[in-house]
Image (cartoon, rainbow, N blue to C red):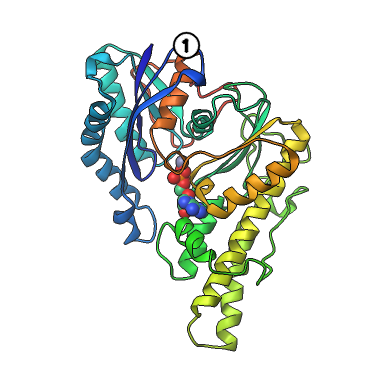
């Protein structure tokens, strides 16, 4: 049995988890503890994550969070076989806190340090929930910073086949919430208000990225592994949708300067949310068809969205396709998923030297998160 301590500090959650596995894969992964100290109340006041405040708060919280994770998991420092940590991507100041802590712990314990890619963590959260997720699979990682579509031909292999060309879906939720005068983070608030609205009330257009975007120009870099445009790449775009909501509000205020009523707000939230979900699911199911996937997973903060969960399951059932969504605790940032990805790395023999550095733009390599 291998016991790992995992640490996640890539954005605004300070998280630690303890997990064990026998190296045979997800079926043997047991999460013994998972502790999250959320900074959401600190950043809400500013309407978004303030990087400097985030890294300072990680420094304050991390020791306590790790001690609590060890206690809850019923293990002492001496029981640990490895220390896994999110190396990137994320806010560099935040990442550095976790990486420095993990390096120190690994050095003091004389145990291996395991580098983990944050998105590999989100993908592996699916295997924590369903160890036998059928492969090949298509996985949509949809969070505040990313909207990426992966093809998983085999366990631990992540091939990027599409991504957003502008805003991430979670970012669109957060920005639209701000336009509507709602609090940060916008996703959960819009999710709640949308339940009272009519999702067909307003038609918000969503760009379908079926061909080359000539306006994007040559500055757009194709990350390693991502097919070039026109070679079967399936992209998303959400910034136009945000503008459509802003225009709708402008028109409404020009016609009637009175405040937006509760029912109107609910209709806007529901219609916006449905437009995002349709764009996400249309592309994702298209990828399922293209790759002949036998399983589908949706991970990341936006996978907590109640309507997305409902509609994804509904579409999956119609096609006889197993659709896996993480539990709510595993949807948003947490360290249990980093432990899972760390165990996967460790069983593949991937460890890092003690001069490991945080990388805010770390690419997720098709073969895993190995540096
Ligand atoms: O994965 P995550 O915790 O952090 C990143 O890696 O970005 O995702 C946070 C994002 C935020 O944009 C938040 O608004 C969104 O996930 N989110 C939601 C919901 N819960 C969180 N979006 C829509 N509906 C939700 N219920
Ligand atoms: Zn995340």
**Above-or-below relation of 302 to 268:** above
Nearer the observer, 343 or 216: 343
Say how many tags the image has: 1
Q: Is residue 21 left or right of residue 237?
A: left
Quadrant (top left/top right/bottom left/bottom right) for the N terminus? top left
Q: Secondary structure at mark 1?
A: loop
Residue density around tag 1, few if under 14, some if 14–19, many if 20 or more, within 10 Å? few
Which residue is pictured at 68% across the width and 59% down the height? 206
Residue 58 coordinates in the image, percent (x, y): 27, 40
Q: Residue at x 50, y 46 (%)?
A: 145
Residue designated by label 1: 349
Q: Nearer the viewer, residue 279 or 325?
A: 325
Q: Residue at x 51, y 59 (%)?
A: 191
Residue 244: where, in percent of width, then height?
63, 68
Can you tell me whether the CB of the residue at mark 1 lies under 8 Å from the nearest atom of ligand 2? no
Does 247 sit above or below residue 326? below
Quadrant housing residue 74: top left
Left/right of residue 359 with respect to residue 16 in the rendered view: right
Quarter holding residue 289? top right
Residue 285 % position (x, y): 72, 42
Residue sitting nearer the eye, 282 or 240: 282
Q: Is residue 108 in sight in this rendering?
A: no
* Residue 274 horizontal side relative to residue 55, left or right: right
The answer to whether any part of residue 343 appears in the image is yes
Q: Position of residue 115 (x, y in %)?
A: 42, 23
What residue lies at 58% left-to-right and 54% top-to-bottom?
A: 307
């Amino acid at each position: 049995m291998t016991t790992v301590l995992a640490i996640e500090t890539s954005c605004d959650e300070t998280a630690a988890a303890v997990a064990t596995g026998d190296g045979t894969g997800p079926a043997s992964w047991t999460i013994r503890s998972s502790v999250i100290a959320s900074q959401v109340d600190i950043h809400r006041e500013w309407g978004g994550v303030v990087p400097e405040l985030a890294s300072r708060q990680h420094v304050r919280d991390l020791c306590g969070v790790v001690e609590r994770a060890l206690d809850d998991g019923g293990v002492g420092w001496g029981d640990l076989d490895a220390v896994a940590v999110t190396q990137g991507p994320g806010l560099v100041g935040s990442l550095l806190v976790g990486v420095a802590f993990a390096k120190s712990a690994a050095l003091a314990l004389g145990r291996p340090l395991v580098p983990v890619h944050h998105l590999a963590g989100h993908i592996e959260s699916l295997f924590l929930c369903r160890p036998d997720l059928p492969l090949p699979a298509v996985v949509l990682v949809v969070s505040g910073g990313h909207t990426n579509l992966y093809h998983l031909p085999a366990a631990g292999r992540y091939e990027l086949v599409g991504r957003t060309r502008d805003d991430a879906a979670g970012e669109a939720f957060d920005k639209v919430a701000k336009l509507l005068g709602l609090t940060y983070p916008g996703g959960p608030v819009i999710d709640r208000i949308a339940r009272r609205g009519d999702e067909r009330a307003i038609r918000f257009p969503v760009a379908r990225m079926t061909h080359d975007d000539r306006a994007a120009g040559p500055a757009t870099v194709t990350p390693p592994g991502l097919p070039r445009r026109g070679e079967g790449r399936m992209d998303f775009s959400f910034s136009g949708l945000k503008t459509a909501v802003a225009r709708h509000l402008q028109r409404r205020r020009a016609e009637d300067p009175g405040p937006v009523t509760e029912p109107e707000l609910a209709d806007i939230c529901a219609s916006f949310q449905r437009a995002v979900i349709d764009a996400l699911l249309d592309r994702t199911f298209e990828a399922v068809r293209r790759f002949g996937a036998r399983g589908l997973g949706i991970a990341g903060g936006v996978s907590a969205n109640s309507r997305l969960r409902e509609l994804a399951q509904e579409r999956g059932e119609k096609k006889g396709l197993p659709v896996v969504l993480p539990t709510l605790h595993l949807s948003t940032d947490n360290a249990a998923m980093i432990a899972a990805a760390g165990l996967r790395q460790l069983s593949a023999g991937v460890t890092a030297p003690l001069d490991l550095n945080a990388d805010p733009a770390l690419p997720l390599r098709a073969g895993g998160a190995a540096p």
